[in-house]
Image (tube, helix red, strand yellow):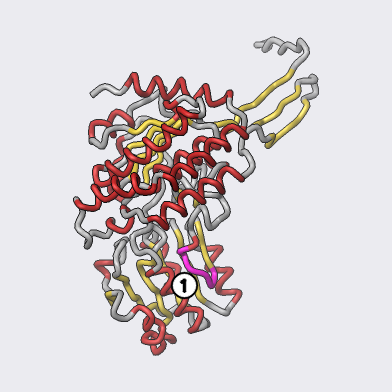
Amino acid sequence: MNLTDTFERTKKASRQLALLTDEQRNAVLRAVADAIEASTDELLAGNAEDLERMDESNPLYDRLKLTPERLRAIASDMRNVAHLPSPLGIETQKRTLANGLRLRRVSVPFGVVGVVYEARPNVTFDVFALCLKSGNACVLKGGRDASASNEKAVEVIKRVLRTMGVCEDVLTLLPATHEATAEMLSAVGYIDVCIPRGGRRLIDFVRDTARVPVIETGAGVVHVYFDRDGDLEKGRRIVCNAKTRRVSVCNALDTLLVHKDRTADLPALLAPMEGKVDFFYNDESRYDTEFMDYKMNVVTVDSLDEALAHIASHGSGHSEAIVTENADAARRFQAEVDAACVYWNAPTSFTDGAQFGLGAEIGISTQKLGPRGPMGLEELTTYKWLIDGDGQVRGKLKIGN
């Protein structure tokens, strides 16, 4: 397999995107949103092919499944992206030097964004929306589990692109093969940044293999700490929502830490999940597990210090939360926990680009260099310096006497 020609076409298309105005991009996004709703039967038929090949007990089944409601939500997110201000051409610095040179630092697209992802067909739409709005072309490499769903999604998008006179190569879906992944990760000069979305194994593979720049996203070993001063009713709602809203997503709760003085409240705290969630008590073998299932650790700690130490040892830098009425404890927790999103009296289920007002997300970055947390439009831009002169020249460097 040689995908060089494919990558070259996408790179060329990324330069053509610069000719589109923000309103033209928005018009495309609104048209794709309409097409998603009009093509519901077609998209669900493709998704059904994938669902037939997956066991319903697989934690990824829920991620893979599309419904009319989920498609309407995807279309709504796309319209939300269209309504957001453009992230391009924004001056982030401006100065005039003593020699009269005028400097401006302005936001620009990366160029070509590559995304490797697993059984989540909504990612196809989210990535396209955010990339188009931010002026980036995108190369998508989905998994075999969602191959029919992704192909149908791309067909719908490309029909709109053709109708609106936009080059189809701004969106490229690669074959769902390991060989395609290898070529994508080695596409130096064609792909400007690669973003993996999936489990820890996928993320580690991409980071360790890629020759193109990588932004790590996704894997979350998530904790909620129920403090000695936690409100029981708030805790019940927060813990249940963090665990059960959608167990297969990366912001779902994995380990509940409970202060030793509140263990008597555990039955009441866990009652909303009884019969639905399997609990493991102080099981050290599961401290580093991202369950993505109706399973949860429950760990007793002696103090806030011990809770912080546990998270420092076993957290993945994704999302962590504290339930407490003690403001000093909460502020210390938020200051000391090293994660992209740190909550006080709110569930980790809010770690989501749409919930953060970003329209959608291309991933949730757990790294520190560059973007961190839900990545929206701003995180898909870099910048360049624009320098205006009037014939100034730089003096020669004097060496020696």
Q: Report the number of numbered marks.
A: 1
Q: Position of residue 231 (x, y in %)?
A: 52, 82
Classify residue 30 by image quadrant: top right
Q: Which residue is located at x 32 percent, y 71 percent?
A: 296
Within the magenta stretch, is there residue 346?
yes
Q: Which residue is located at x 72 percent, y 26 percent?
A: 103
Query: Which of the pair 150/118 is nearer the observer?
Result: 150
Q: Looking at the image, which residue sits at the far bottom?
A: 264
Quadrant location of the N terminus?
Answer: top left
Badge 1 is on which residue? Answer: 305
Query: Which of the pair 198/103 is nearer the observer?
Result: 198
Within the magenta stretch, is there residue 345?
yes
Q: Is residue 230 left or right of residue 177?
A: right
Above or below for 264 versus 179: below
Above or below for 321 versus 357: below
Quadrant location of the C terminus?
Answer: top right
**What span is in magenta?**
344-349
Above or below for 394 versus 367: above
Q: Position of residue 85 (x, y in %)?
A: 64, 42
Q: Which residue is located at x 54 percent, y 32 percent?
A: 135
Q: Which residue is located at x 43 percent, y 71 percent?
A: 241
The amino acid sitting under disc 1 is Asp
Element marked by disc 1 = helix
Q: Position of residue 37 (x, y in %)?
A: 44, 48
Q: Position of residue 230 (x, y in %)?
A: 51, 81
Q: Is residue 312 visible?
A: yes
Q: Is residue 213 left or right of residue 289?
A: right
Q: Is residue 372 visible?
A: no
Q: Specify few, some or many for label 1: CA neighbours under 10 Å numbering under 14, 14-19, or 20 or more.
A: few
Classify residue 397 by image quadrant: top right
